[in-house]
Every structure is written in C-alpha cells, then in structure tokens.
Amino acid sequence: MQALQIDWQTHVPAGKDGTRTTARAKGKVERPFRTVKEAHETLYHFHKPETEQQANEWLWNYLLRYNAQRHRSEKHSRLEDWLTHLPEDGLRDMCSWEQYCRFAREPESRRVGVDARVTIDGTVWEVEPDMAGETVTLLWGLFDDEILAEFAGETWGPYYPVSGPVPLHHYRAFRQGKAAERADRIHALASQLNLPVSALSGGDLRLVSDSTQSPEALPHQPFISPVSEYQFPSVIQAKLAIADDQATPLARMSDEARAVIDSILAETLIRSEVLGRVREYFRNRQSGEDHAG
C-alpha cells in the first residue's frame, strides 16, 4: 500500500468515546460490480465472446453507456460529474498486472539443494544450476503459481513446480452436482434465445455526446515503478513463456515469427518488454490478415 501511495487509516471502535458514530462499510465499492454482473454479464448467454479482447470491448461499451446515464443526485451524467472533480494534475495511470503482483510478494531465504531444487510444503521447484548449494531469496506472491529468486544481485524467474500438489488455477474434474446440472439447463435455455450482437458490441449506437471529453484525452500521470523489471533466466525460458502466452508451440509458428522472436530475445530478456513486443507483433499480423481477407 505504501508503494501505491495509499494511506492506512483506522477508526475508533464503535461506542469507545460515546460521542460519534464510527465508520462502517456501506457497500459503495461492491455496488457497481454487482450492477455490471447482473446487467451486463448475463448477456454473454446470448453471445459468447470469441476472445478476451472482444469481451473487454463489449464491457467498455457497456460502461460508456452506463456512465452516460444521469447522475442519481445531480442534473448531469455520471461521466460529466466525474470529469468535473478530476484533480488538476490528471489521472494517475494504473500499474501493470505484473507490477501489482510484485507488491503482493514476500521474500523468504532458502538454501537450494545440490540438485538445484527447492522443496516447500511438498512442492518441488527447480531453479538455475548456478544456484545449487547457495542461499537465495525466494519471492512468493498471492497471485502467483510460480516463484522468482533473487541471486547475485539479480532477479531470476519465473520458475514453475516440477512436482507436487495441483498448482493454482488448475483443477481436477469432479462429478457434477445439482447446481451444475441446473446451470447447464439455464445455459441451454439461453442458447435458444436471440439477442442482436450490436447490444454488446455497440454497433450503430450513440454511446456518449460529442461534448463529453474522451478519457484518452485527459491528462495522465505515468506510474513510476519503485522495483526493477524482472528478466527471464535464459532464452529457452523466454521462448517457453512466449509459447505459453500465445498458446502455440514455437515449432508451429512461421519462420518469420520465429526470426522476430529471436531478434527480440537477442536485444533483451526483460519479461514485460519481451512479452509486450511479441504480443504487438502477433496483434498487427492478425489485423493485417483480417484486412487482407
């Protein structure tokens, strides 16, 4: 929270001094999420997004229409009220997901075995051979299913478990219960209904007035990271991460794509820069193929 410049404030317990009503949760943060879940997410039963990018575009379209509605207590829209109360310095950009995960990581010193492996709670992790027999600092995170290691003044990783329990976001298949069967029936019923896709994508819809300022045109404050960037331990680990990110083995990619990846890895091994440039290359390539078709 200090890295995100968030002040930690506590309130007096209820009835301690007998002169004031203490703070309490009112659900103001949860209410918008519930609105989106009930008013927008249910429309996915009619048209399932083909990609994550398409789902985000539909969500963005819904949020624009939602914020263009009238404010509950003012005479203008929600978006106009928000623009009126913007700070003079502009918005502060959000940090990347990788940077957010770093804030939730806690260091722990461990001694690596002679086989370059570390065993923690029944899970075996394999690190660099140079770390064998040395004491390293492992970085654990709440949102990670891998670990990173600090050794010789550098941060290496990520490293994935080679054996042990089922990792995070991986599940075993169980027999369906009554709730799952009821959800399947609802899904089958939703597939029989019809809804124009323009209701989700925003086609032929006027979202906001011309007088409303676009969020991209607003002043922004860049997010300055207090932590150095992580880098891949080797070119092989970088290529494995690229194949996992693109969900395609490098052997199935074209010669041109592999040449571009090799040129990027020859310049840098910084994780965020490598994945960003590779994603930009495949995004431009796909858009060019769609235009040619």
Image (cartoon, rainbow, N blue to C red):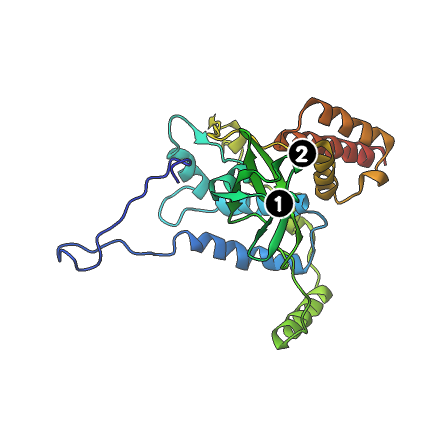
140 or 291, nearer to the observer:
140
Residue 46: in sight, yes or no? yes
Q: Is residue 205 left or right of residue 10?
A: right
Question: If the image is split into quadrants, where does the N terminus sit?
Answer: top left
Q: CA distance from mark 2 to mark 1?
A: 20 Å
Q: Is residue 263 left or right of residue 58?
A: right
**Badge nearest the viewer, 2 or 1:** 2
Q: Secondary structure at mark 1?
A: helix
Amino acid found under the numbered disc labelled 2? Leu
Q: Earlier in the sequence, mark 2 or mark 1?
A: 1
Q: Is residue 118 above or below residue 89?
A: below
Give residue 56's mark: 1
Q: Residue drawn 27% across and 48% down?
A: 10
Q: Is residue 108 above or below residue 292?
A: below
Q: Is residue 149 left or right of residue 18?
A: right
Q: To which residue does mark 2 refer? A: 275
Instruction: Please identify the quarter of the rendering in which residue 18 is found.
Output: bottom left
47 or 275, nearer to the observer:
275
Instruction: Please identify the quarter of the rendering in which residue 132 is found.
Output: top right
Q: How many marks?
A: 2
In percent of width and height, residue 223 lies at: 48, 30
Amino acid found under the numbered disc labelled 1? Asn
Q: Residue drawn 67% across and 25% down?
A: 268
